[in-house]
Image (cartoon, helix red, strand yellow):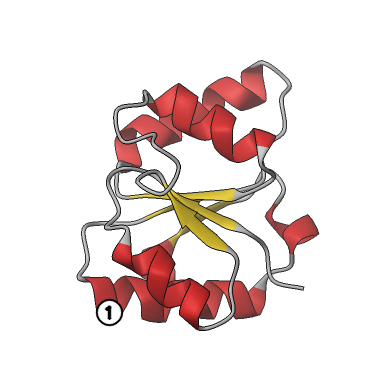
Amino acid sequence: MPFAIYLDADVHPVVARILRGRGFDAISANDVGHRQASDREQLDFAVAQRRTLVTFNVSDFVGEARAYAQEDRDHWGIIVSDQLDVGEVVRRLTKVLGRYSAPDMINRFVWLQTFA
């Protein structure tokens, strides 16, 4: 079963719309009014919703993943990527969605570049 995705404010909201059109459970920070939320608020929201967070903000979310681990808190996965165009993000995320289940994503940190 594919996992649910939450795209933070760095990722264009059209990615979520395209993924939803393909049958995936995807929402964006724009969809839920969180465009101005801090990184921790973005991750906390994703966790509360049991969603894997997707971001281009690599350096900050490496730190957030470490902080969660130090706090002995679980998250539903974090996918990070360099800035890519919408089509490439959708293509690579579709590969990730096909590879992992929701339980597989718990506390997993995925580099989208590995899904070229």
Q: Secondary structure at mark 1?
A: helix
Q: Is residue 116 visible?
A: no
Residue 4 position, x and y percent, is: 63, 59
Relative vertical location of residue 72 with respect to residue 11 in this rendering, above or below? above
* In this picture, residue 59 sits left or right of residue 54: left
- Given residues 83 and 3, the one toward you in this image is 3
* In this picture, residue 26 sits left or right of residue 28: right
At a point 58% along the width and 51% down the height, the residue shown is: 52
Relative vertical location of residue 50 with respect to residue 37 in this rendering, above or below? below
Most extreme residue toward the top is: 71
At a point 67% along the width and 45% down the height, the residue shown is: 76
Residue 83 position, x and y percent, is: 21, 58
At a point 32% along the width and 58% down the height, the residue shown is: 13
Give the amino acid at mark 1: Gly
* In this picture, residue 17 sits left or right of residue 106: left
Q: Is residue 13 visible?
A: yes
Asked where in the image residue 71 lies, by quadrant, the reply is top right
Q: Mark 1 sits on what residue?
A: 87
Asked where in the image residue 99 lies, by quadrant, the reply is bottom right
Total tally of numbered discs in the picture: 1
Residue 34 position, x and y percent, is: 39, 34
Residue 27 position, x and y percent, is: 49, 55
* In this picture, residue 41 sits left or right of residue 35: right
- Given residues 20 and 41, the one toward you in this image is 20
Quadrant location, the N terminus: bottom right
Around disc 1, counting alpha carbons within 10 Å, would you say few (fewer than 14), some (14 to 19), or many (20 or more)? few
At a point 72% along the width and 33% down the height, the residue shown is: 74
Relative vertical location of residue 36 with respect to residue 89 in this rendering, above or below? above
